[in-house]
Amino acid sequence: MIAHRNRERDRARAEGFESGERPRTDEQKSRDKQTAMIWGCAAVAVPAVLALAYYFTR
């Protein structure tokens, strides 16, 4: 995994990207946004379900 990351960084630098990272494509950005939305909802929903379960079983 680390060797692959190093190869990709070196290729990006060879192609002129000084930071060693290619800019994110629109598809990658939309996938990141969708993933963030899913994790955000899960972070809110899990404690809410636990609180409701506690309330109703008390």
Image (cartoon, rainbow, N blue to C red):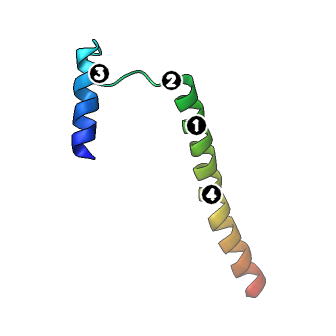
| Residue position marked by numbered label 1 in the rendering | 31
Residue on which disc 3 sits:
12
Identify the mark at residue 25; answer none if there is no mark.
Answer: 2
Say few, some or many: other residues with alpha carbon within 10 Å of mark 1 (under 14 / 14 to 19 / 20 or more).
few
Asked if marks 3 and 4 touch (Cβ < 8 Å), the reply is: no
Which mark is first along the chain, 2 or 4? 2
Q: Is residue 42 above or below residue 14?
A: below
* Residue 42 locus on image (x, y percent): 62, 57
Q: Is residue 52 above or below residue 44?
A: below
Under tag 2, what secondary structure? Answer: loop
What distance separates the C-alpha of mark 4 from that of mark 2?
26 Å
Label 3 to label 1: alpha-carbon separation = 22 Å
Cα gap from disc 1 to disc 4, whole angstroms:
17 Å
Q: Is residue 19 visible?
A: no
Front tag of 3 and 1: 3
- Which residue is the site of mark 4? 42
In the rendered view, tell whether residue 48 sits above or below residue 33.
Answer: below
Image quarter of the C terminus:
bottom right
The residue shown at (27%, 39%) is 4
Ranked by sequence position, the earlier of labels 1 and 4 is 1
Crowdedness near tag 2: few (<14), some (14–19) or many (≥20) residues, C-alpha within 10 Å: few
Q: CA distance from mark 3 to mark 4?
A: 35 Å
Identified by mark 4, the residue type is Ala
Measuring from the top left, give residue 2's x and y in whole percent: 23, 44
